[in-house]
Amino acid sequence: MRKPLIAGNWKMNNTCAQAVGLIEELKKGHWGDEVEVAVCPPFTALRDVKQALGNSPIRLGAQNVYCEDAGAFTGEVSVPMLKELGVELVILGHSERRNVFGETDGLVNKKAAKVLKSGMVPILCVGETLEEREQDKTQDVVRRQIVQDLNGLTGEEIEKMVIAYEPIWAIGTGRSATAAEADRVIGYIRGILEDLTDGRLAQTIRILYGGSVKPGNAEALFEMPHIDGALVGGASLKANEFLGIIKYAAGKEIG
Ligand code: PGA
């Protein structure tokens, strides 16, 4: 059974004070065990968010990490540093990391291996640009990213990961993929994972959709058989919107 995951990617938003305020609002929401919820604040707010979460079921995630444990890597943050703060999930290969900061599939692959060894869960993001989509290259692009980013990982390791399909043209644009479009690509990704693992694993790996998810489109997205939740950017910064999305994922268990 795959339990839906709703993860909030706060990006470079929220000072510590703002972050704690948002957590206090989110803690007023109610949902059952059927859905897993996580927030991914900026590094600077991780400790305060962890403390504000207290015994809330909301899990703590980070937005990035480097692939070395320590050393001369100015500006970077390591896996032991995140673990010490109680981080359980790490977003990897977000399109903003790839496009603004030049991260390659090779680097994302090293990071994925490192995070998996630590026991934290990578949320690996893949997705095509508008140009690639218009040239009908979506499948080629996501296949290349998945194959290269998971290179050398065992089926057992891959099974522990979460994949997020985030078409770049849908991120922060208000223009979401339709539920059917997103489901088609996510079904295709599941097929790639089937090829890479032993088939059985592809049915257990959670694959999220991300890109302008809002309460208004969440229900249709979560009705789709392959979509196991969402990676939410803009709408995760507003408690009522994030809670609205969680509500639609509660009650959906897939598999
Ligand atoms: P968005 O961002 O929900 O604001 O489109 C999603 C993401 O980048 O993870």
Image (cartoon, rainbow, N blue to C red):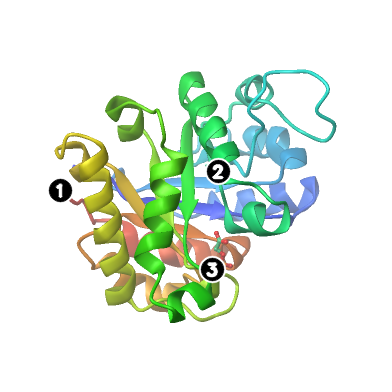
Question: 194 or 40, which lies in front?
Answer: 194
Which quarter is ligand 1 in?
bottom right
Discs 1, 3 touching: Cβ within 8 Å: no
Mark 3, ligand 1, within 8 Å: the answer is no
* Sequence-first tag of 1 and 2: 2
Under mark 3, the amino acid is Ile
Which structural element holds mark 2? Answer: strand
Under mark 1, the amino acid is Gly
Q: Can residue 234 be seen by looking at this rendering?
A: yes
Q: Residues under labels 1 and 2: Cα distance?
A: 25 Å
* Sequence-first tag of 2 and 3: 2
Whether residue 68 sits left or right of residue 133 in the image: it is: right
Question: 231 or 238, which lies in front?
Answer: 231
Residue plotted at (54% across, 54% down): 8
Kindly identify which numbered label has been placed on residue 4.
none
Kindly identify which numbered label has been placed on residue 168.
3
Q: Position of residue 163 (x, y in %)?
A: 40, 48
Q: Residues under labels 1 and 3: Cα distance?
A: 28 Å
* Sequence-first tag of 1 and 3: 3
Residue plotted at (37% across, 54% down): 143
Determine the image quadrant of residue 67. top right
* Circle 2 residue: 92
Q: Position of residue 60 (x, y in %)?
A: 56, 38
Whether residue 251 sits left or right of residue 215 in the image: it is: left
Q: Position of residue 50 (x, y in %)?
A: 63, 34
Q: Residues under labels 2 and 3: Cα distance?
A: 15 Å
Q: Nearer the viewer, mark 1 or mark 3?
A: 3
Q: Pick the quarter of the image with the N terminus.
A: top left
Kindly identify which numbered label has been placed on residue 255.
1
Q: Position of residue 123 (x, y in %)?
A: 47, 43
Whether residue 235 sits left or right of residue 11 in the image: it is: left
Mark 2, ligand 1, within 8 Å: the answer is no
